[in-house]
Amino acid sequence: MTKITILPITVFLLLVLTLFVAKSTNASAVDCDLCQLSIDELSEMAQTDNLTYSDIYNAIDRICRSIPSYSYECSAILNSSGDSVIHQILNGTSSNVICRELMCYKQIDIVMNEIKSILVQ
């Protein structure tokens, strides 16, 4: 049995959902709590099961590909934010810090899109 099969799918689904929430335009306190919960659970599993970056990335990638209607978006978010999140989890960064950064990046994306739309006019 590989490390990946030991991991509960729900935690990975929570992480994927967290990455989606980070890219949404109106994250709420509940979204932040969900983000912290999923990061905390994944951090605990990574430490307990000695997971590597590849273990986590490949499992999330498989989940993304298994959701046909969101496969493209999920993979795009994993490719843009997943690397940073996974490294922070493995380095022991607190879920509070990780989730705040995800929400900050979301706000930066919103501002950049607004700037681009103004410049195009």
Image: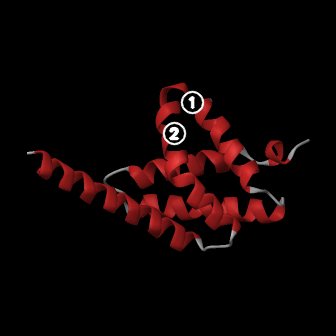
Query: What whole-number distance in Å separates the C-alpha atoms at marks 1 and 2?
Result: 9 Å
Amino acid carrying mark 2 in the image: Cys
Q: Disc 2 designates what residue? A: 74
**Residue, x 58% and y 51% (percent of image)?**
15
Q: Secondary structure at mark 2?
A: helix
How many residues crowd mark 2 within 10 Å: few (<14), some (14–19), many (20+)?
many
- Residue at the far left: name it: 121
**Residue, x 77% and y 56% (percent of image)?**
52
Viewed as shown, does residue 8 lie left or right of 60?
right
Quadrant that contains the N terminus: top right
* Tag shown at residue 67: 1
Q: Secondary structure at mark 1?
A: loop
**Residue, x 60% and y 45% (percent of image)?**
13
Q: Quadrant of residue 120?
A: top left
Viewed as shown, does residue 3 lie left or right of 46?
right
Are the residues flagged by discs 1 and 2 in contact, CB closer than 8 Å? yes
Image coordinates of residue 25 in percent, x first then y, are: 31, 52
Quadrant that contains the C terminus: top left
